[in-house]
Image (cartoon, grey):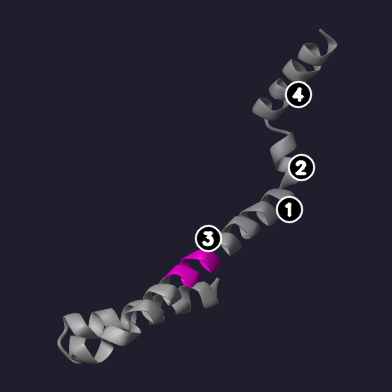
Amino acid sequence: MITGFGLFAVGFLPIGLVRKKVISAAFLTPYYPICIGLIAVGIYIFTHLSNIVDAYKLLAKNEVYTNRFGFKFRQKVRKKFNDF
């Protein structure tokens, strides 16, 4: 996740420097596709890993999830529907 956020930040850094007029836009024009690529890869890594972390959290707390009323109710409904 840190890698994804880092790539995202590095991709936006040159764009921010141009907005603050620290670097001229003409100098960075050939590098804009690289910046957009870094932003895209950073977003992809961040979202992919956050989904994996959420899945592992669900696995770690599986007992809590299966003891909920909604889960038990759905199981009963599924069983009755399958028996029908």
Image point 81% across, 15% down: which residue?
Answer: 82
Which residue in the protein does label 1 denote? 60
Q: Amino acid at mark 3?
A: Thr
Q: Earlier in the sequence, mark 3 or mark 2?
A: 3
**From the image, which quarter does the C terminus lie in?**
top right
Does 15 sit left or right of 55 as displayed?
left
Q: CA distance from mark 4 to mark 2?
A: 15 Å
The label shown at residue 82 is none
Q: Which marked residue is nearer to the observer: mark 4 or mark 2?
A: 4
Q: Which marked residue is nearer to the observer: mark 1 or mark 4?
A: 4
39 w.r.t. 34: above or below:
above
Which residue in the protein does label 3 denote? 47
Which residue in the protein does label 4 denote? 75
Image point 79% across, 12% down: which residue?
Answer: 80
Q: Earlier in the sequence, mark 1 or mark 4?
A: 1
Q: Earlier in the sequence, mark 1 or mark 3?
A: 3
Q: Which marked residue is nearer to the observer: mark 3 or mark 2?
A: 3
Nearer the observer, 19 or 68: 19
The label shown at residue 63 is 2
Q: Do the CB atoms of the residues marked 3 and 4 lie less than 8 Å apart?
A: no
